[in-house]
Image (spheres, grey):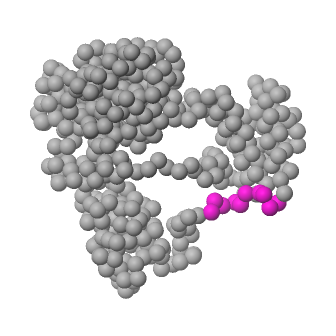
Amino acid sequence: MTDAQQTAEAVTGVVTPEPSGPAPVPLLAPREGVPPVTADVETLQAVVEAFAAGRGPVAVDAERASGYRYGQRAYLVQLRREGAGTALIDPVACPDLSALGRVLADAEWVLHAATQDLPCLRDIGMLPTRLFDTELAGRLAGFARVGLGVMVETVLGFSLEKGHSAVDWSSRPLPEPWLRYAALDVELLVDLRNALEDELARQGKLEWALEEFAAIVAAPPPPPRKDPWRRTSGVHKVRRRRQLAVVRELWAARDEVARKRDLSPGKVLSDAAIIAAAQASPHDWRTLATLHGFGHRMGRRQLQHWQSAVDRAKALPEAELPQPGQPASGPPPPRAWAEKDPAAAARLSAARSTVTSRAEELSLPQENLLAPDVVRRLCWEPPAEPAPDAVAEALRGLGAREWQIAQTAEPLATALRADAEGV
């Protein structure tokens, strides 16, 4: 039995099977049962006091309503801490959790896939100063599959219910099975953290992980995406500038409706419908009604609304039409390198091979060893003299962490030199 399994057995009182033995033990309910949902100021204050008096790391999770509601706000926040138990908080009824964030400011937060939840937690006043990301820890430790359920099963020997991950968490009241699922998401998160810390330390990777976690905490909120309409699925099929203008106008019209109705944009109008309208450029709403995504269930008023967006695009002067390609802020797509700069293409091939080999030696994904964009930028504009120190400085300027630089600067310098010398 592993140390992680012994820890889980001691905590839960359930005997954990050996990996080669019976199936993992189903974890059917939280230790203290499913707590009531905190949905008023008085109950929230009691939660704040309980978690302030708790000990050790705090497990944190959030449920959103992706695919149902506009934006990525949290509709349920789950926390667990030794001495405080588990809390389920409704951030719709309690939209300001800054008091809770303050009392947990000095605690280490344990999240799974932290970058997914931190934006919505930030919006309600919760932001860690230290964290441990169990998904990222699993990647660095070399686990092939790093979903929470798989990690809990692989590392701790328990299986979690998987049935409610994609439900509409904006529903009220939340059904009891959903709440049980949500509470179980934080039930063993600290235990998983402890086991992964031991494994990372055993592999000599714990300092790497801590550096990654610190980088997540220190990262500023991402700036608004430029030209978000260009992410419309299927936009690559649209070639003409006038048609691209139709995509842009329909996307903006859809976004306005979705925001006002608090609906996922895809529930208002599908990306496929936008692309179909852009390619057909219909002359009136009746023609629009014949296109994919504008079927018989859509009323005349709705059709006229979308047709107005098409008409606006068709009336734009040539100078206001969008360009076919999004202006690039970095290197061109790698597929174009061989034609634009064959030497850069050769450097990229050598560097990619080097990173892949080094990642295999370290038993971690190559994108975690060094981000693909960093490799591309290094190869497009390499140091004048590709010595290890110069490569290290270039990687540092591109945002690589120190542990990544220590593992890749020298082999990358060797690869770049060999390519430059034609070896």
Residue at the location (36% across, 62% down)? Answer: 400
Main secondary-structure element of the magenta-colored stretch: loop
Residue at the location (41% across, 39% down)? Answer: 118
Q: Is residue 406 left or right of residue 39?
A: left
- Asked whether residue 213 appears in the rendered view, the answer is yes
- Asked whether residue 148 appears in the rendered view, the answer is no
Rendered location of residue 59, percent (x, y):
29, 31
Rendered location of residue 252, percent (x, y):
70, 42
Indicate the quadrant where residue 370 lies.
bottom left
Q: Is residue 331 left or right of residue 39?
A: right
Magenta segment includes 172? no
Indicate the quadrant where residue 363 lies.
bottom left
Q: Is residue 288 above or below residue 30?
A: below
Residue at the location (83% across, 27% down)? Answer: 300
Indicate the quadrant where residue 135 lies.
top left
Q: Is residue 30 above or below residue 312?
A: above
Magenta segment includes 322? yes
Q: Nearer the viewer, residue 379 or 111?
A: 111
Task: Specify start and end residues of the magenta stretch as a single range.
Answer: 318-327
Rendered location of residue 130, percent (x, y):
29, 43
